[in-house]
Amino acid sequence: MILSVQKKASRFSLKLFLYFYIIFFFSGCEVLSTTKQIETPLLDKNNYIQFVSLETEQTAQTIEKTQFEWQELYKGIEFCTFFDKSSSSVCNAVKIKLDTQNLKIIASNPVEPFYNNLTSIFKGETTRKFAKNNNAIVAVNATPFNYPAGRLSNKRTLAGIYAVNDIIYAPKAGNYAALVFYQDKHGKFFAKVLDSQNDFEPNDSTRFAFGGFWALIKNNDIIKFDSKQKEPRSAAGIINNGRTLILLAIDKSNFTSKGATFNETSSILYNLGAEEAIMLDGGSSSSLVIDGKQISKAFPHVEVALSFGFVFDEPNDKPKTDESELKESKLDKSEIKP
């Protein structure tokens, strides 16, 4: 009896050790910070990308078309899960009409704005917790981040731009792109992808600017990357001249979803109709949450620095949908091959 208890305790201790080992060594985003506290430079774009783009017609011929069955979650917000054969990955996409009435964008707040007059400190928080605390309909992780006080601390700094209205809370990283949300004179939102964060200049119409990695699609052309690394991915695309936003999360889970390369992510977004697109933070940071449910699959989901999402200022009629349908979203499991 005592031996049995000891064996169980030993197995528990081993599992606990392995869990913290994975968290400590393999979690987090894919980039180091731009802040002066860290001397290691940003990821070198030259190691990842060829400075060429593909013609739209040529690109269309090389992408295997996937049929998308969009499910309406709320007025102006649709969701789709599908299996992408080219990357062997389960993909989760949300399409949001930014000019939907009463739609509002929310994002994480810094706990120490302008720390050392350089950048802001954020408290680590999972995207799911962010969504729950703010009653977000949809939420996604955004800007890459760093651990200024070590991985055991809950302090985070951003590796790239973060701006709210005309206030810049984290400095620009010129090597990286940005996703910027504006509001026109009628109060309707629209978005743009900037190739370089150095191009960002806040004005009266600016509402939010989020950093990411590099642009994936520009002017309907896919940008080709050299990197072959397959990871869980978070990305964003825009269509209809910036009036519609696509949020994409690509799973990497066991043998059912392999994750995606930069090029595979670009192709998926192009197939979804994106005219411009940006890669957000990926790896174990990748997280898409809908109505409080963790939709994307990656292990582990770490506490990130910055998430953003959407709420309605006033109640919005929700279509009657079986909750199990949201989880499965008409995904044909027969397409998934180990």
Image (cartoon, grey):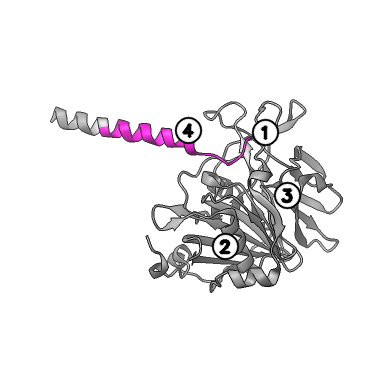
Cα separation between marks 3 and 2: 20 Å
- The quadrant of the image that shows the C terminus is bottom left
* In the image, residue 151 above or below residue 211: above
**Residue topped by disc 1:** 41
Q: How far apart are labels 1 and 4 at the CA level?
A: 21 Å
Please name the residue that numbered disc 4 is placed on: 24
Q: Given this view, does label 1 or label 3 mark the residue nearer the observer?
A: 1
Return the residue at label 3: 178
Q: Which of marks 1 and 3 is nearer the N terminus?
A: 1
Marks 1 and 3 close (CB-CB < 8 Å): no
N-term-proximal mark, 1 vs 2? 1
Give, as a single range, the part of the protein colored magenta: 11-34
Q: Where is residue 33 in the image (x, y as percent from the top left)?
A: 66, 34
The amino acid pointed to by label 2 is Ala
Under circle 1, the secondary element is loop
Q: Distance between the residues labelled 1 and 2?
A: 32 Å
How many residues crowd mark 1 within 10 Å: few (<14), some (14–19), many (20+)?
Answer: few
Q: How many C-alpha atoms fall within 10 Å of the one at disc 2: few (<14), some, or many (≥20)?
A: many
Secondary structure at numbered mark 3: strand
Mark 1 or 4, closer to the camera: 1
Which residue is label 2 attached to?
93
